[in-house]
Image: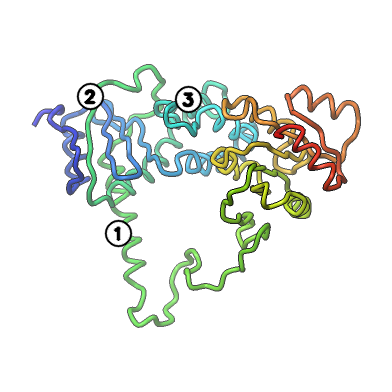
Amino acid sequence: MSTTSIGSYRLFQKLHPLSLLAQLTSRRTTGCLKIFTENVFWSIYLEEGKLIYASYSDKLFERLDSHLRRLEQQNPTLDNATRLQMRLMFETQNENELIPYPDYQAICWLVTQEYITDAQAAILIDDLAKEVLESFLSLKEGNYEFNPDKSLDELPKFCHLDLRLLVEYCQKQLRNRQNVQSSVPADGGSRVLPKTKPPLTQPQTKIQLGTVQGNNEISQPPVSNSLYKIACIDDSQTVLNSINHFLDGSKFSVVMINDPVKALMQILRSNPDLILLDVEMPSLDGYELCSLLRRHPAFKQTPIIMVTGRTGFIDKAKAKIVRSSGYLTKPFSQSDLLKMVFQHIG
């Protein structure tokens, strides 16, 4: 069977991931294997049968960011601001403006800018590949295609991983997980299991508008038919609640965000008409975040209002430098807030 005979299928079929990977490895294949299901896809890049990179479309940059956080102690410059800048550069929300293999390009950028070393990039790719292959090996059906072109040739290569060893590792992990799951008594007894996420039956904090759930993420109300969507970024729950109270629910849909780094995707997906951005936050300076947002094509024209207790000339000058649209000084009244909002969207 030639490499190119691994073709593409329009209809979902039963998949045998192990057999598929074995064919590619034994033939020292070069190219990209893509596997598709209804909502997600996997990409496995090979060179002479060795794995160059593996990617999984679900939570692509969340997974990369999680691994990069572990490198922050070794690389102090790999901080929240750097990772946020990386995501704004390579992560797109418009399907018509997709960047090819954006996560791999992001890793190449981190190396080029000397945020991580070549060796760290190789370890990072190895760790990501294990996660990707583990999810792929659990797949039962879908369709796939193999593109024999050398799609990553224009980018640097950081490793050539033994696909057989990776698969063996992933199979072991899957077996261990299955063993843990099978140890749960069928009668619901009290056998002690390794720590896992709390069961769904565990009592949950009642979700109300603007309340903080157990994981410190802000709960959001259902999207209404209001006229304008306002994103509020502030580490203070009191300020968020005040803004939400001041903005009439019949005219505004308020998206409250208390962590600018973790909530980046929420900002991108909500596509707000206006952003209220706190200047002083412990995880990221508001001016810096404003500057990063302005570099993203989705936010070049979006009104961004800096909210702060600072009133000095230098602070207002900084706001202009990062191209903010306005400056709202704390404490502010409902009238002050509405005047500022309607000035920019009404």
- Residue most toward the right? 312
The residue indicated by pointer 3 is 108
Whole-percent x, y for residue 135 in the image: 33, 48
Per the rendering, the mark at residue 197 is none
| Residue under pointer 2 | 148
> Picture coordinates of residue 277 (x, y %)?
73, 39
Q: Could you tell me which secondary element the residue under label 3 belongs to?
A: helix
Q: Report, in whole angstroms, how far the alpha carbon at label 3 lies from the one at label 1.
A: 34 Å
Q: Quadrant of residue 160?
A: top left
* Mark 1 residue type: Arg
Q: Amino acid at mark 3?
A: Cys
Judge depth for marks 1 and 2 and give the one in front: 2
Tag 2: amino acid = Pro
Residue that badge 1 annotates: 175
Graded by Cα atoms within 10 Å as few (under 14), some (14 to 19) or many (20 or more), the crowding at tag 2 reads some
Task: Give the residue drawn at x 23%, y 37%.
Answer: 144
Q: Is residue 110 left or right of residue 13?
A: right
